Structure formats: structure tokens, C-alpha cells
Amino acid sequence: MTKGLTIANLVHSMKGHDITTFIRDQHYQFTERFGLNYDEPVMVTLKFESHQDAHDFYNEIRMNPTYVQEYTVTSHPFHELSLCVTGQATLYDYFGSREPNLLTISRDLDLRFEIEFVQSYSKTTFTGSVNHGELLSRQCLIEVSDVLPELTLGGLVQIGRSEREFEDLLTRCYIVKGMSL
């Protein structure tokens, strides 16, 4: 791997004009090449410290009219202290500046949890922790193949919509050298 790039630097290095157009073009190339689409809602996994915290969070999403229309929450199939949350178009929508979001629930209920997101197809990852409504120790890692960049870059539509959103998630992109067969 090489030195990490910001999303703006990656777009510039790949001769993109602006981030919004770049994201749209890469998604189109992914769809054309692979016949697949990143159209399913983003799913994040939240890991809690106790059963009570997970239970409180679950009930808040299931019972509060503000959240019931925005999110779907299920228990994790393998980890008893984890919940899976879906319903938003981008990762940023869960933890960004537009409230109410998952940070609002954490702040209102005085909860802490760890976040994990692994994107299908590309394996782009996001990890972070939330402590009483504050998003801490976060990072989004995008590994871009120099052989098939659209495999990863097609999924940018699920991460964010603007340079600010990618930077708020502390996104770093790495060009991974591949071998042609």
C-alpha cells in the first residue's frame, strides 16, 4: 500500500472534476462492469457494553416515532451485545451533522457503543466509537485497486455525498497495486 489520500486527493489523482460527479461516474462504471448496484440501505453494527444499553437503544428505535420511520434495528445473529441498524442511504447519514441520528440517541440515553461497517463487494471499512453522543476514534479506510478501481469506488455512494462528509468520517484512500492475470 501507498500513503493514504484524502478523497479530494484521490479524485484529483484520477482526473476527476468534482467529488459529486466522480462518485456518480464511479457508481455508473461499477454498475456497467459488474451488473450490480449499491442500492441497498447501509447497515451498521453497533456493539454495546451491556445488555441494558443494547436493550435501551433497541427500544428507542423501535418505539420512538422519530426513529421508527428512519431506522430498522435487529439483534446481531452472532454477538449478543450487538445490534444491526439499517435505513439510511449513506454511512454519513447515521453519524453526520443532520439530526436526529444515532448520535442523538446516544446523547439522549447517555450510551456508549462501538461502530463497525464493512461494505459488500469492496470491503471498505468504517470503525469508530460513540460516547454520549460524540463520535470518537473514527476512521474510514478505502483500498482502491489499481487494476479494477471501480470495484471499490462504485461503493462511494454509500459512504458520503461531499468532501466534507468524507472528511468528517476521517476517510483515507489507499491505492493497492494489483497484478494482471
Image (cartoon, rainbow, N blue to C red):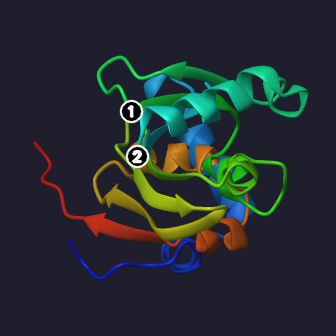
Query: Between 152 and 132, which is closer to the camera in this rendering?
Result: 132
Which residue does the numbered mark 1 point to in the structure image?
81
Instruction: Identify the residue at horizontal 59%, vertical 77% (top origin).
Output: 8
- SS category of the residue bearing label 2: loop
Kind of residue at disc 2? Glu
Query: Residue at position x 31%, y 27% from top?
Result: 79
Tell me residue 113's x, y (percent): 48, 51
Q: Is residue 91 left or right of residue 147?
A: right
Q: Which image quarter is the C terminus in?
A: top left
Q: Residues within 10 Å of mark 1 (few under 14, many from 20)?
A: some
Instruction: Determine whether the residue tagged by mark 1 lies in a helix, strand or loop.
Output: loop
Identify the residue at horizontal 56%, vertical 28% (top origin): 55
* Residue 109 in sight: yes
Considering only vertical position in the picture, is 177 above or below 61? below
Is there CB contact under 8 Å for labels 2 and 1? yes
Crowdedness near tag 2: few (<14), some (14–19) or many (≥20) residues, C-alpha within 10 Å: few
Viewer-side residue, 24 vs 87: 87
Residue 42: percent from the left, percent from the top?
59, 34
> Which amino acid lies under the numbered mark 1 shown in the image of this protein?
Leu
Please name the residue shown 44% across and 43% down the image. Answer: 48
